[in-house]
Image (spheres, grey):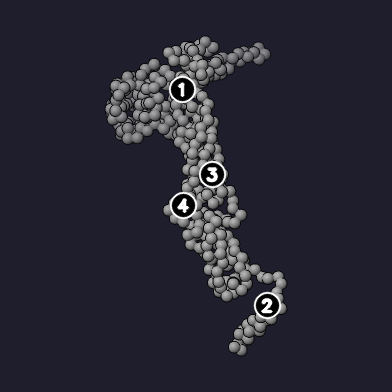
C-alpha cells in the first residue's frame, strides 16, 4: 500500500505549508482536464486522498500512529474525505480547469463535508431545579462508552502481528450465495460476515479486546450548567462519546429544568402572584414576597391597585447572556368573607361618602 508521504513526495516531518505546496503542484499536474493519461484520474484521487489525511492534524496523527495498513482498516474513503478542507486549493484548480475537487470526484466533497456520524455521539440528561438557573452550577454524569483498546492501540491485533487475507472471501470482502429456484440458479452477493467486508482478518486478534480494537469503560464527567440555561437546552462534552473510525464522538447532555410551583418562566423573565388585602389595594402599602432564590423582597403596592394588576420588580428575573430579566407579580386582591360590626359600619360610612362624591355633593 502506497504511503501518503511518498504520494505527495514530502518527508514525514513536513510542515502543513510543505504539504499544501506539494498537493498544489501534483494536483495541477495530474488533474484529468490537463493530463489525458489513463491513470491521471486515479493519481489525482490518490493525491487528494493523501492531502485530505495529512492536512488534518487528527487524521495525520492516527496515520502516523497506525501506519498505512491499519489506518486503511480503520478509515473508509468516506471517513478520509469527511470534513476535508481544500479551501483555496479548490479555487486554485477551478481557475485553471472546468472544475475543482468536487467535479473531479463527482461531488464527493459536498457529501463528506459533514462531521462524523451522529451515531458516535452519546446522549444523557440532567435534571435541575428552576432555582439553579440563577448561577453557574456543576453536575456529574456517568456514561459507558467505547474507547480505543490500550493493549493494541485500537488496531485489534496483537503487537508484532498483522493481517492476513480472509479465507472465507479470498480477500474480496464479498460472498456469493447461490440459490436454486426451479430450473434457475440465483446468485446474490453479500458482505463477508467473517471480515465484515474488509477482505482481511487479524493474524492474531488482540486478546484484550477480542479483535474489536475497542473497549468499554465508564467515565464520570463534571459538567458546568451555565446560568440562565433553558429547559431542554443541550450541552456538548467534546470527546465524551463513542470511538469509531479514528474519531471520538461527543456526549450530548439535555438539561431538564424542573418547574417551580411559585413561578412561571418565559425566557429571562419570571412571573408570580401575591395576595393583598382590599384595604392595602385601595390605600397603597407594601408586601413582602419571596424571590426564586428564597430571599425576601419588598413589593410596593400603589394606591388604587386593581385585582389582577401586574407590578414589576426590575432585575429579579433570570440572568443570561449578560442581562438579567425581571419579576412580574400579579396582584390578587382578597375580599374578607366575614366582618365585625365595626368594620361593617365603617364600610357603610365609606359607601355613603363615595356616593356623595359621585353625585357631586362634596
Classed neighbour count for the residue bearing mark 4: other residues with Cα under 10 Å, few (<14), some (14–19), many (≥20)? some
In the image, residue 348 above or below residue 150: below
Q: Secondary structure at mark 4?
A: strand
Question: Is 247 situated left or right of 92 in this image?
Answer: right
Residue on which disc 4 sits: 320
Q: Position of residue 223 (x, y in %)?
A: 49, 40
- Return the mark for residue 172: none
The answer to whether one can see residue 118 in this image is no
Indicate which label's residue lies in the foreground, 2 or 3: 2
- Return the mark for residue 343: 2
Measured in 3D between alpha carbons, the distance from the residue under mark 1 to the one under mark 3, in whole angstroms, is 33 Å
Along the line of sight, which residue is nearer the eye, 283 or 46? 283
Residue on which disc 1 sits: 150
Q: Secondary structure at mark 2?
A: helix
Measured in 3D between alpha carbons, the distance from the residue under mark 3 to the one under mark 4, in whole angstroms, is 15 Å
Measured in 3D between alpha carbons, the distance from the residue under mark 4 to the one under mark 2, in whole angstroms, is 49 Å
Pointers 1 and 4 in contact (C-beta within 8 Å): no
Q: Earlier in the sequence, mark 1 or mark 4?
A: 1
- Quarter of the image for residue 39 reads top left
The answer to whether one can see residue 210 in this image is yes
Measured in 3D between alpha carbons, the distance from the residue under mark 1 to the one under mark 4, in whole angstroms, is 42 Å
Q: Position of residue 228 (x, y in %)?
A: 49, 50
Indicate which label's residue lies in the foreground, 2 or 1: 2
Classed neighbour count for the residue bearing mark 1: other residues with Cα under 10 Å, few (<14), some (14–19), many (≥20)? few
Indicate which label's residue lies in the foreground, 4 or 2: 2
Residue on which disc 3 sits: 255
**Residue plotted at (56% across, 17% down):** 193
Amino acid at each position: 500500500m502506497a504511503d501518503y508521504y511518498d504520494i505527495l513526495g514530502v518527508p514525514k516531518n513536513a510542515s502543513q505549508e510543505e504539504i499544501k505546496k506539494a498537493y498544489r503542484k501534483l494536483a495541477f499536474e495530474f488533474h484529468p482536464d490537463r493530463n489525458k493519461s489513463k491513470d491521471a484520474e486515479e493519481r489525482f484521487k490518490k493525491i487528494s486522498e493523501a492531502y485530505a489525511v495529512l492536512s488534518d492534524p487528527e487524521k495525520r496523527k492516527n496515520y502516523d500512529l497506525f501506519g498505512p495498513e491499519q489506518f486503511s482498516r480503520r478509515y473508509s474513503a468516506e471517513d478520509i474525505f469527511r470534513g476535508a478542507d481544500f479551501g483555496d486549493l479548490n479555487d486554485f484548480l477551478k481557475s485553471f480547469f472546468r472544475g475543482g475537487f468536487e467535479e473531479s470526484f463527482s461531488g464527493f466533497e459536498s457529501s463528506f463535508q459533514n462531521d462524523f456520524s451522529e451515531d458516535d455521539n452519546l446522549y444523557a440528561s440532567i435534571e435541575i431545579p428552576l432555582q439553579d438557573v440563577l448561577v453557574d452550577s456543576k453536575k456529574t454524569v456517568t456514561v459507558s462508552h467505547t474507547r480505543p483498546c490500550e493493549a493494541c492501540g485500537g488496531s485489534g491485533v496483537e503487537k508484532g502481528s498483522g493481517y492476513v487475507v480472509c479465507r472465507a472471501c479470498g480477500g474480496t470482502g464479498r460472498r456469493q450465495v447461490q440459490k436454486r429456484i426451479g430450473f434457475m440458479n440465483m446468485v446474490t452477493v453479500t458482505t463477508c460476515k467473517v471480515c465484515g467486508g474488509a477482505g482481511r482478518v487479524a493474524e492474531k486478534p488482540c486478546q484484550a479486546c477480542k479483535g474489536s480494537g475497542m473497549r468499554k469503560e465508564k467515565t464520570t464527567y463534571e459538567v458546568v450548567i451555565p446560568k440562565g440555561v433553558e429547559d431542554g437546552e443541550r450541552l456538548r462534552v467534546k470527546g465524551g462519546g463513542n470511538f469509531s473510525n479514528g474519531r471520538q464522538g461527543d456526549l450530548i447532555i439535555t438539561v431538564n429544568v424542573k418547574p417551580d410551583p411559585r413561578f412561571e418562566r418565559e425566557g429571562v423573565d419570571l412571573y408570580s402572584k401575591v395576595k393583598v388585602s382590599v384595604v392595602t389595594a385601595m390605600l397603597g402599602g407594601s408586601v413582602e414576597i419571596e424571590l426564586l432564590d428564597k430571599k425576601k423582597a419588598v413589593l410596593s403596592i400603589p394606591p388604587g391597585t386593581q385585582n389582577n394588576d401586574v407590578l414589576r420588580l426590575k432585575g429579579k428575573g433570570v440572568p443570561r447572556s449578560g442581562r438579567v430579566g425581571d419579576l412580574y407579580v400579579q396582584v390578587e386582591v382578597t375580599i374578607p368573607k366575614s366582618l365585625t360590626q365595626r368594620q361593617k359600619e365603617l364600610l357603610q360610612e365609606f359607601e355613603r361618602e363615595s356616593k356623595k362624591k359621585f353625585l357631586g355633593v362634596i
